[in-house]
């Protein structure tokens, strides 16, 4: 059953809410760990890594902005893939997002909980309960719809940027120019490793495609929100990287809570409170926007027959897909259970999440090349992004087991649907 891309929106999200939602999906948990990890791998040259990835993000973000603005549809990338590559490819894309990318939800919640545990001295046994609270709060907010979630996101992102600016300001006086030499202590190989890390930080542009129909004026708001988010996120990571290298020097990346180390440089007494606030805001903010996207996608997949029809209610723009949100919550709880069973070992779930994202990006960019007008600015951005995503797909080859299984499930569903049609037409 095909779906139609809707060219108009009946939503009510404005520009500020859009920027806040995009910032949550892009900044995310990278703020908590990446500045230190990148500094450890590349030293002062990690600044180059931030600049390179910011530039590389432009064609990917730009392509998704063009698609979301022209074709606001709750199916997001799956809808574009359906139009360009057919039902089976679209079904696989939807499953990758709903069932694969969803593995990152408990990871985000657990990272926030672990950060708070480290800075406030909470017993590790309490981490799962804090993580679950981080998941439940945005889940409940999304029961009232993406517009309410959008206002919450605006408040959260304002607080987050305020704390980040504060951390940079208090650590800036401790920056020592001597810490920027030698600039390439680990060679260009270290820079390459840091670039791969920051790719994770600049992912998340596809989230806006699923809620694009909720914007009042998607053709105007989405491109502006994307451009502003690119500038703010790039500036935030670059500023953090400068003070991380300049203030912490060779010690950058030696600890697991680099923001706490930075805050202690200028405000040791207030540092735990500030960084605990960052962890809580990031965890709730990221989950807030991703749960909205998962729910809209789930309802859209139900409309196209890729999920049981019961979950389709709320797929239309402006409606609240509560049934699909319940499905999303159930998927998250399954991943939470698996995570607890592995004693909070995050790596397997991060790999499932990132491999699924790369697969989605690759098909999404191929679809964009076929959909967008050949030779247009959007088409050129899609072509460049498709080449970049193909390279990322090759790098992620060893982690593609779950996406491969979900793709096989999509093929099985296609075969079952065709068999059913043949039976009823006889």
Image (spheres, rainbow, N blue to C red):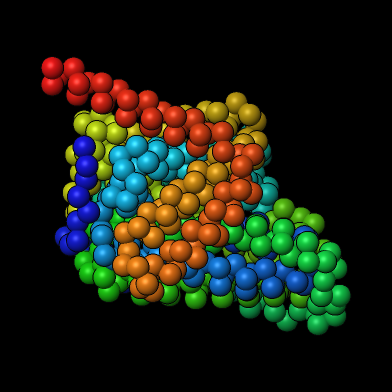
Q: Report the front residue among 201 and 142.
A: 201
Location of residue 47 with respect to 310 vertically, above or below: below
The x, y position of residue 258, in whole percent, is 70, 60
**Residue furthest out toward the left:** 425
Residue 90 appears in the picture as rendered: yes
Residue 289 appears in the picture as rendered: no
Q: In this view, does 37 lie to the left or right of 228?
A: right
Q: Report the front residue among 226 and 372.
A: 372
The x, y position of residue 159, in whole percent, is 47, 67
Residue at the image position 49 percent from the left and 58 percent from the top:
386
Q: Quadrant of residue 234?
A: bottom right
Q: Report the front residue among 331 and 267.
A: 331
The x, y position of residue 331, in whole percent, is 42, 33
Location of residue 342 with respect to 78 vertically, above or below: above
Q: In which quarter of the image is residue 192?
A: bottom right
The x, y position of residue 416, in whole percent, is 30, 22
Q: Quadrant of residue 35?
A: bottom right
Residue at the image position 57 percent from the left and 38 percent from the top:
400
Residue at the image position 32 percent from the left and 25 percent from the top:
415
Question: Which quarter of the rendered picture does the C terminus lie within?
Answer: top left
Q: Is residue 146 left or right of residue 226?
A: left
Q: Report the front residue among 221 and 391.
A: 391
Residue at the image position 76 percent from the left and 79 percent from the top:
175
Q: How many marks?
A: 0
Location of residue 372 with respect to 110 vertically, above or below: below
Question: Which quarter of the rendered picture does the N terminus lie within?
Answer: top left
């Amino acid at each position: 059953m095909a779906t139609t891309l809707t060219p108009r929106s009946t939503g009510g999200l404005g520009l500020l809410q859009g920027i806040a939602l995009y910032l949550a999906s892009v900044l995310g948990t990278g703020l908590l760990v990446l500045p230190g990890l990148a500094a450890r791998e590349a030293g002062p040259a990690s600044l180059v890594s931030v600049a390179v990835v910011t530039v590389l993000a432009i064609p990917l973000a730009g392509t998704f902005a063009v698609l979301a603005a022209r074709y606001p549809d709750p199916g997001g990338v799956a809808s574009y893939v359906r139009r360009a590559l057919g039902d089976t490819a679209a079904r696989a894309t939807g499953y990758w997002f709903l069932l694969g990318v969803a593995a990152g939800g408990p990871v985000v919640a657990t990272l926030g909980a672990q950060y708070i545990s480290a800075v406030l001295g909470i017993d590790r046994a309490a981490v799962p309960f804090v993580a679950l609270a981080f998941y439940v709060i945005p889940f409940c907010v999304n029961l009232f719809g993406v517009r309410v979630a959008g206002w919450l996101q605006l408040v959260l992102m304002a607080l987050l940027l305020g704390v980040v600016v504060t951390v940079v300001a208090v650590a800036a006086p401790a920056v020592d120019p001597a810490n920027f030499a030698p600039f390439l202590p680990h060679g260009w190989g270290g820079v390459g490793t840091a670039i791969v890390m920051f790719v994770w930080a600049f992912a998340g542009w596809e989230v806006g495609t699923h809620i694009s129909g909720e914007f009042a004026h998607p053709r105007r708001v989405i491109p502006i929100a994307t451009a502003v988010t690119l500038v703010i996120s790039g500036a935030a990571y670059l500023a953090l990287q400068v003070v991380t290298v300049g203030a912490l020097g060779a010690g950058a990346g030696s600890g697991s809570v680099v923001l706490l180390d930075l805050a202690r440089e200028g405000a040791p007494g207030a540092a735990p409170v500030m960084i605990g606030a960052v962890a809580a805001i990031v965890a709730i903010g990221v989950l807030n926007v991703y749960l909205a996207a998962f729910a809209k996608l789930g309802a859209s997949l139900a409309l196209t027959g890729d999920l049981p029809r019961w979950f389709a209610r709320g797929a239309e723009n402006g409606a609240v897909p509560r049934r699909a949100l319940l499905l999303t919550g159930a998927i998250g709880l399954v991943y939470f259970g698996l995570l607890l069973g592995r004693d909070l070992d995050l790596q397997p779930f991060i790999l499932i999440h990132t491999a699924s994202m790369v697969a989605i990006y690759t098909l999404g960019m191929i679809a964009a090349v076929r959909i967008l007008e050949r030779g247009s600015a959007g088409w050129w951005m899609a072509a460049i992004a498709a080449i970049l995503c193909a390279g990322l797909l090759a790098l992620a080859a060893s982690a593609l087991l779950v996406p491969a299984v979900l793709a096989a499930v999509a093929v099985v569903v296609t075969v079952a649907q065709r068999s059913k049609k043949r039976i009823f037409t006889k």
